[in-house]
Amino acid sequence: MGELDPIYRNRPTPAAADLFGDLLEVDATSATKRARPQLLTYLPGLGITGIAALAAAWLGDHYHAPLMLMGLLIGLAFNFLNADARLHAGLGFASKTLLRWGIVLVGLQVTIWEIAALGWPSFVAIAVMIVAVMTVGTLVSRALGLGAAFGTLAGGSVAICGASAALALSSVLGEKRVNQAQLTLVLVAVSAASALAMSTYPILSNLLGLSPHAAGFLLGASIHDVAQALGAGYSLGEVQGQTAAIVKLTRVALLAPTLLLVTLTLPKDGHAKTGAPPVPWFIVAFLALTAFNSVVTLPPQVAAAAKIGTSALLLLAVVATGIRSPMHLLLQQGWRASMPVVAATVTSFLLALAAAELLF
């Protein structure tokens, strides 16, 4: 073979080009540095995220506003900081890794016995509603030309547990299918819809003359956010609150099977890593903690700490998502992008109302 041209002798050799056209140039030194990232590279981004999260927590506590919505709005207010490359490592860690650990901790808040106490007819009704709401979100999204993945994200966030489900589904779908702007839009829309539902659904349940158990089922099966579903239920009474809590936690428990189903039905693409497990590790960990929590009675302090930890990790992930969101793409989405969330919300309420009338 001839001698290599001096122009190319000292240039790094491209390691690979994935199916999305991203050319990866990797040398031994840079690969080693990425394999062992320095803790200091995460601190700037995590520091900014932590400060913004504390501000959101203060606003939510003092003005009784939805915590995740406050986190998202504060994150968007700090969006200009995304231009600083020094923050990218920490922001990426908060929006992905901390998110997954937050999902894992949700497993300590639900048990198999709570779901069993609901009864199999109610459980089947909730499962059917989740599938139907996600299907409606997907169909509306495809009809508007927004893509099936965006519809899955929008419908799943409404069907299960609002912003938390949206973040979890985005982790499974990946940024190649749902970008940061689309995720941010869903978070805004589902948080606003959940706040509106918390304010209006208890009034509607009284106007419709629903029994306490039926009203609790309606609220727990149709309000997006966990805290808002419980708040709406207990605002009507103890029975309504307890029923709403069990129904809502059943929806949360179905998050892991839903993520598993989405993972297994996703079309394969070049973004998937060779040899990667078919089921994400955080889904397995979620199911393991749920099973553990079902057979071992944890001290109340542990359960309370897990709840606080979940809220903190998810809040950090939401704030980081807001900071990382490309504003120019977010502003280009238009009113149509909120329609899958609206359609899924209306479908969720109507199906929950029908199930409540039939079951109670």
Image (cartoon, helix red, strand yellow):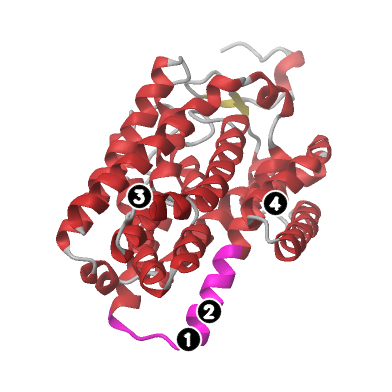
Q: Is residue 41 visible?
A: yes
Residue 104 % position (x, y): 45, 63
**Residue type, numbered disc 2:** Ala
**Residue type, numbered disc 3:** Leu
The secondary element bearing badge 4 is classed as helix
Q: Which residue is mark 3?
A: 208
Q: Which residue is mark 4?
A: 70
Q: Is residue 32 left or right of residue 99?
A: right
Asked where in the image residue 158 lies, by quadrant, the reply is top left
**Residue 307 is inside the magenta segment:** yes
Q: Which residue is mark 2?
A: 304
Q: Residue at x 39, y 30 (%)?
A: 137
Q: Which residues are magenta?
A: 295-311
Distance Cα–Cα, label 2 vs label 1: 6 Å
Q: Residue at x 47, y 52 (%)?
A: 203
Residue 240 % position (x, y): 38, 67
Distance Cα–Cα, label 4 vs label 3: 32 Å
- Marks 3/2 in contact by CB < 8 Å: the verdict is no
Instruction: State which tag comes first along the sequence, 3 or 1.
Output: 3
Mark 3 or mark 2, which is nearer to you?
A: 3
Q: Which residue is mark 1?
A: 300
- Count of number-bearing discs: 4
Q: Is residue 5 above or below residue 100?
A: above
- Marks 2/1 in contact by CB < 8 Å: the verdict is yes
Q: Badge 1 local density, few (<14 within 10 Å), some, or many (20+)?
A: few
**Residue type, numbered disc 1:** Pro
Instruction: State which tag comes first along the sequence, 3 or 2.
Output: 3
The secondary element bearing badge 2 is classed as helix
